[in-house]
Amino acid sequence: MQVSLSLAPFSCLLSFQPPNESREQIVEWAFGKRMTPAERLRKHKNSLRKTVRELEREQTKLQQQEKKLKEEIRRSAKDGHMGAAKIQAKDLVRTRKNIEKFASMKMQVQTLQLRLEVCFPKIFMWGDEGGLHGLTLLFMIVAGLELFDGYGHEGCK
């Protein structure tokens, strides 16, 4: 028994000719447009702002939950349910710790935002017009390392 394969549906693939474009245009089409350092900075700033908003939202939810827990503890204690009140008090402590953690995370993200705002323009002065040297300096600054790049410039601390 012979099976015949028809390549008719795939004929358009067999006759594919790449467009007469430059290599850069093909790479841009395949991987997307190359972003300038300023565009990359704007993108990172927007993502940091979004993260801060999300952290604030979660912190607000936790604060509302804390208020509800306080009321529940009062009601439980008033009704004489001390076991339930103890469990709710432990939950309240956990909620307060989470509120503190979210506040700490928010402060860290805002610190990173401020460092980007302050240090990014200085990197262009130090580096080679925003090349690899400048980006390396930015990441080292963000990592909190003391810098000395050999030209007499110290880090942005």
Image (cartoon, rainbow, N blue to C red):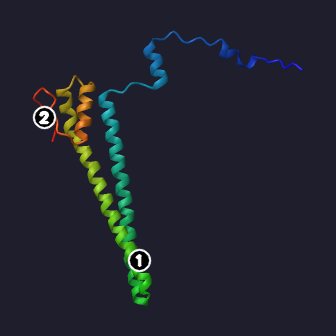
| Distance CA(mark 2)–CA(mark 1) | 52 Å
Q: Percent from the top left, x then y, of residue 44?
A: 33, 39
| Residue at the spot of label 1 | 88
Q: Label 1's element?
A: helix
Which residue is situated farthest in the left direction here? Answer: 152
Residues under numbered marks 2 and 1 in contact, where contact means CB atoms less than 8 Å apart: no
Q: Percent from the top left, x then y, of residue 96?
A: 33, 68
Q: How crowded is mark 1: few (under 14 residues within 10 Å), some or many (20 or more)?
A: some
**Mark positioned earlier in the residue sequence (2 or 1):** 1
Name which quarter of the figure residue 129 lies in: top left
Which residue is situated farthest in the front direction here? Answer: 1
In this picture, is 43 found above or below 91? above
Residue type indicated by callout 2: Glu
Name which quarter of the figure residue 47 lies in: top left
Residue type indicated by callout 1: Gln
Q: In this view, does 98 lie to the left or right of 146?
A: right
